[in-house]
Image (cartoon, rainbow, N blue to C red):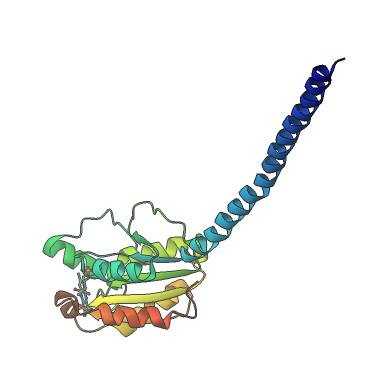
Amino acid sequence: MNRIGIAVVVLSVFLLVGLAGVGFCAEKKKVKKEPAKEAKAQKVEVKAEPTVAKSKALVVFYSRTGNTKKVAEEIAAVLKCDIEEIIDTKDRSGVSGYLASGKDAMKKKLTVIKEIKNDPAQYDLILLGTPVWAGKMSTPVRTYIVQNKEKIKNAAFFCTMGGSGDAKTFVDMEEATGKKPAATMTVLAGEIKKGEYKAKVDEFVKALAGIKP
Ligand SMILES: Cc1cc2nc3c(=O)[nH]c(=O)nc-3n(C[C@H](O)[C@H](O)[C@H](O)COP(=O)(O)O)c2cc1C
């Protein structure tokens, strides 16, 4: 082999060693990337936990003419929690509906309500809202409690009314649920009309601070 031949062989060897080196580095880089991906995935999982915990309070209400609905929606907005409206299948509109509702409430009658969307057993706290009917809870709320009593872990009560009967209504609800309420709140129909109930809702939610998950 002459000098040029030797030089070609030496250069070829260097070239091969160089290429192998690049390949090795690339492999090394690939291996390094894997743990970084894992770390990212773990972070997302950790973030998911508080969101689950937040959904543990449920506002449940019935409203014949919209007052209790307004208050219930405000509570759910402040707590950022789920909300369930109890829908009665009985027509309670007009004067005849008013009179029939008064009678049903006084006799502690039950009604047929539509299927509920949220399982109360999945929540730590159920906030139950009703209009006051003849010094008692409304018939659809009584029906909900009878059907779900065993699934209610903790309860808080709120009601709306014209002017009197809230205390008796809360006793009625306590007896029906078998639960001492974590907090209670009464909002007058007049306050709702004027839009003056948000401060009361804030206080109610604050009173639940120890219970709210
Ligand atoms: C059948 C019936 C009975 C009522 N009885 C009372 C009562 O005993 N005391 C009271 O202050 N308001 C009473 N009200 C008024 C409601 O409690 C009040 O208007 C309430 O805010 C209505 O809520 P809603 O719009 O969510 O149905 C009665 C209303 C109805 C329909």
Query: Which one is in front, 27 or 170?
Result: 27
Q: How many marks?
A: 0
Question: Where's residue 170, x and y in %?
Answer: 36, 80
Q: Residue at x 29, y 57 (%)?
A: 88
Question: Where's residue 67, x and y in %?
Answer: 21, 70
The image quadrant that residue 165 belongs to is: bottom left
Quadrant location, the N terminus: top right
Question: Where's residue 98, x and y in %?
Answer: 17, 66
Up-down: is 90 above or below 100? above
Q: Is residue 171 visible?
A: no
Up-down: is 57 above or below 33? below
Q: Residue furthest right?
A: 1
The image quadrant that residue 39 belongs to is: bottom right
Query: Which one is in front, 168 or 210?
Result: 210
Q: Residue furthest left?
A: 95
Quadrant of ligand 1 in image: bottom left
From the viewer's perspective, is 84 left or right of 4? Answer: left
Q: Residue at x 30, y 56 (%)?
A: 87
Query: Which one is in front, 35 or 113?
Result: 35
Q: Is residue 194 visible?
A: yes
Q: Residue furthest top?
A: 1
Q: Residue at x 36, y 80 (%)?
A: 204
